[in-house]
Image (cartoon, rainbow, N blue to C red):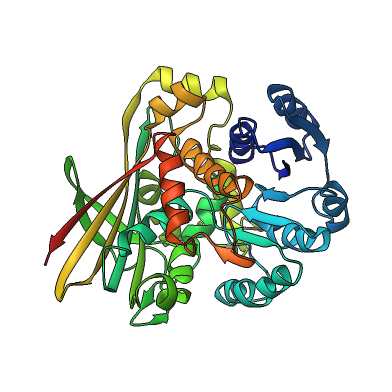
């Protein structure tokens, strides 16, 4: 029987808690957050829930909360990542998060390399496992990419496309955190090109393509995400020697944010305005409505009617099979915003990400994770990939793969 500590009880953390409440191998779920009302409300909804108010800015607080815990699920903002990682090591327990944690003292790519090497050694030393980047993208998309390359003898290029096509009648540029969105959209992206991780400016390397069932040409651009760095670093062992990996993002959020970036409104460098110094990104955030997260708030938006409820996640793996060049195209299918709300009370974005994370937790609690050290979500072995996808299908998350000779 497993005891879990879930840090952060927002949409992702609460989704994992609810899924794990159904697991026979889970005995207790500690729901921890600084928001006392939120943890009490969530714990009351669970059979195995226990509320805990916590200040997660201090490692010692997390270590104390994690006493006797088998797994810490970190669903806090990324700024807490390194704190929780350190706490997991000190508490000698397993760890999971939704995105690779930033270390402000070093370069982002170097930070990921450090986690996969030095931090991994520390988890191995205590006989525990940490899995990073386990949401939807990264997360589900990494598992689907692993599944795609199994159809190849060798891989040349992996293209990942994520299109968010949900549009409400009210002004709502993002269905996920505007703070995270603006940070990602103003940071350099790091595609893996010709066997090297290289820096690319935001909104660069644009491409257009259509999707199955939709004839519109969607514009995609470079976007700062974990996947290209992780897959580049894991090229030889997990991705058949892939030489090029791209993550392309498109949709209404990108269309909205790009002009702001070009104008300098996503910059964190202070500027003078009428004799006062202001940070442009703070101004943009102040004027951007937050993503909806409360049941009544989401219902009100959906009752007004959506202008569009679309989206796509597609992986292209191009390489050689039996001496021929082929393209493996994998579509990841999930619920739209309306259907996700009817099923779970969540938006499509939070449903997809939360369920993706819960499936990695399910691997843990059912003893399907046998690796030790720190690993990323693209490092599952194929028996683990198969289990993940089988369980995902039960949550209406499925993949559809076609193979075409080029």
* Rendered position, 360 above or below 231: above
Residue drawn at the location 43% of the way across and 69% of the way down: 231
Task: Please tell me in which quadrant of the rendered image residue 123 appears.
Answer: bottom right
User: Dividing the image into 4 quarters, which one contains the N terminus?
Assistant: top right
Task: Please tell me in which quadrant of the rendered image residue 21 appears.
Answer: top right
User: Dividing the image into 4 quarters, which one contains the C terminus?
Assistant: bottom left
Q: Along the line of sight, which residue is nearer the eye, 106 or 14?
A: 14
Q: Position of residue 277 (x, y in %)?
A: 66, 59
Residue lying furthest left in this view?
406
Can residue 264 be seen here? The reply is no
Residue drawn at the location 42% of the way across and 65% of the way down: 202
Q: Position of residue 192 (x, y in %)?
A: 39, 75
Q: Along the line of sight, which residue is nearer the eye, 318 or 212?
A: 318
Residue drawn at the location 31% of the way across and 66% of the way down: 158
* Rendered position, 361 above or below 295: below
Left or right, residue 27 beside residue 245 = right
Residue drawn at the location 56% of the way across and 19% of the way down: 296
Q: Along the line of sight, which residue is nearer the eye, 117 or 113?
A: 117
Q: Position of residue 199 (x, y in %)?
A: 44, 76
Q: Position of residue 321 (x, y in %)?
A: 20, 70
Can residue 18 be seen here? The reply is yes
Left or right, residue 389 beside residue 9 = left
Left or right, residue 230 beside residue 211 = right
Q: Along the line of sight, which residue is nearer the eye, 77 or 297?
A: 77
How many numbered discs sit on the rendered protein? 0
Task: Please tell me in which quadrant of the rendered image residue 59 appears.
Answer: bottom right
């Amino acid at each position: 029987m497993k005891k879990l500590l879930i840090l952060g009880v927002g949409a992702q953390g609460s989704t994992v808690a609810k899924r794990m409440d159904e697991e026979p191998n889970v005995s207790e779920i500690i729901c921890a957050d600084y928001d006392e009302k939120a943890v009490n409300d969530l714990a009351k909804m669970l059979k195995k829930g226990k509320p805990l108010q916590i200040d997660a800015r201090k490692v010692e607080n997390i270590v104390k909360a994690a006493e006797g815990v088998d797994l810490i699920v970190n669903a806090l903002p990324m700024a807490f990542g390194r704190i929780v990682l350190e706490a997991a090591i000190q508490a000698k327990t397993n760890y999971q998060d939704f995105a690779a944690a930033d270390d402000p003292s070093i370069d982002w790519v170097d930070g990921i390399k450090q986690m996969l090497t030095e931090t991994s050694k520390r988890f191995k030393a205590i006989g525990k496992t940490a899995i990073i980047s386990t949401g939807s993208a990264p997360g589900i998309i990494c598992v689907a990419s692993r599944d795609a390359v199994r159809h190849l003898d060798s891989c040349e290029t992996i293209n990942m496309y994520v299109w968010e096509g949900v549009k409400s009648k009210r002004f709502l540029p993002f269905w996920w955190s505007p703070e995270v969105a603006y940070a990602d959209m103003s940071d350099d992206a790091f595609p893996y090109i010709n066997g090297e991780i290289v820096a690319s400016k935001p909104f660069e390397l644009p491409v257009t393509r259509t999707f199955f069932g939709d004839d519109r040409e969607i514009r995609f651009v470079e976007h700062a995400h974990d996947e290209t760095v992780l897959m580049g670093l894991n090229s030889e062992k997990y991705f058949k020697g892939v030489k090029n990996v791209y993550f392309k993002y498109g949709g209404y959020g990108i269309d909205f944010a790009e002009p702001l970036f070009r104008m300098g409104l996503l910059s964190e460098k202070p500027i003078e305005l009428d004799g006062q110094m202001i940070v442009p990104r703070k101004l943009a955030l102040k004027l951007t409505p937050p993503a909806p997260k409360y049941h009544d708030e989401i219902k009100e938006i959906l009752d007004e009617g959506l202008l569009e409820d679309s989206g796509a996640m597609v992986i292209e793996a191009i390489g050689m099979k039996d001496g021929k060049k082929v393209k493996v195209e994998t579509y990841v299918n999930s619920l739209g915003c309306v259907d996700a709300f009817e099923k779970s009370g969540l938006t499509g974005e939070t449903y997809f990400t939360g369920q993706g994370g819960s499936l990695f937790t399910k691997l843990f609690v059912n003893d399907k994770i046998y690796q030790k050290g720190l690993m990323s979500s693209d490092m599952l072995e194929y028996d683990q990939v198969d289990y993940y996808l089988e369980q995902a299908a039960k949550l209406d998350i499925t993949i559809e793969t076609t193979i075409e000779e080029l």
